[in-house]
Image: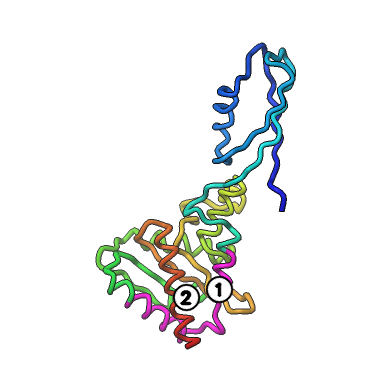
Amino acid sequence: GSPRRNWIFLKTSERRWSPTLLHEFLQRFRSWDVVIGLFALRNSVIEGHFLRVLPLVRVHQMTTGDFSSNQLLAQEQSCRFEEFSNQEAMELGKLALDIAIERKLPIALEIRISDWTVFKASLPGSKPENDGWIARKARVVMMTGHSTMYERVRAEEQGIDWHAEHGVVDETHAIHGGGLPLSTKDGTLRGVMIISGLPQVEDHMLAVEIIKSYLQRQAG
């Protein structure tokens, strides 16, 4: 589609708006990491009028892990199961544990069906506070049906306060990568897989890798 165009009107006084000054002003807009501006300036000095800056074209939005929300949605859809019961939960957990032990990863992981913890492991190097992170990530997935990374990136793209939008606080709901929905192919949310202990992008990617590896084995 067409790039998103934003219009800004600046109330000015007797002040010269040089390209450098305009650039410094635009840097205050944290939602734009790369901005192309075509500036139409009626006068070099504007007295009490509005300066029209047009258009501001967002050409790239930096996000956590440099993901896009569309990419993460597609990723979720590729990680769906034919069915998900205790059997799949235990098999998925065992695979996750085998991978984590082989790589000596200092993680804690859980697999839940709804609010029921079916599989849990805390590997050497993990810490008690990982349990708190797991609980906070799990609440986000069960509330939204999406991965914690998706929710974080969507909020970054839209420039919104995710917690205010959902009426929750960070102390109970963490939009940090590592929580993935466990859904069936018809879109039904059955549970959640949560990993904590690595940097959040690595938590997320490890969970995706484990689920995809499990699905490939099932398909083979």
Q: Foreground: 86 or 46?
A: 46
Which class describes the residues within 10 Å of circle 1: few (<14), some (14-19), or many (20+)? some
Residue type at the position of mark 2: Lys
Seen from the viewer's position, the closer of residues 1 and 103 is 1
Picture layout, residue 79 above or below residue 6 = below
Q: Which residues are magenta?
A: 73-98
Label 2: which residue? 212
- In the drawing, what numbered circle is on residue 78? 1
Secondary-structure class at tag 1: loop
Among the two numbered marks 2 and 1 on one chain, the one whose residue lies closer to the N terminus: 1
Asked whether 136 falls inside the magenta stretch, the response is no
Could you tell me how many numbered marks the image carries? Answer: 2
Q: Position of residue 130 (x, y in %)?
A: 35, 61
When asked about the image quadrant of residue 83, the answer is: bottom right
Compared across the picture, whether 66 is left or right of 128 comes to right
Inspect the magenta stretch and tell me whether residue 94 lies in it: yes
User: Residue at the location (72% across, 12% down)?
Assistant: 47
- Give the spatial CA distance, label 2 vs label 1: 8 Å
Residue at the spot x=55%, y=69% of the render? 76
Q: Position of residue 155 (x, y in %)?
A: 58, 51
As drawn, the label of residue 145 is: none
If the image is split into quadrants, where does the N terminus sit?
Answer: bottom right
Percent position of residue 118, x then y: 43, 78
The kind of secondary structure the magenta stretch mainly shows is helix
Q: Is residue 16 toward the left or the right of residue 130 in the image?
A: right
Badge 2 element = helix
Q: Amino acid at mark 1?
A: Ser
- Near-viewer residue (77 or 161): 77
Tell me, yes or no, whether the two marked residues, 2 and 1, touch with CB atoms within 8 Å. yes
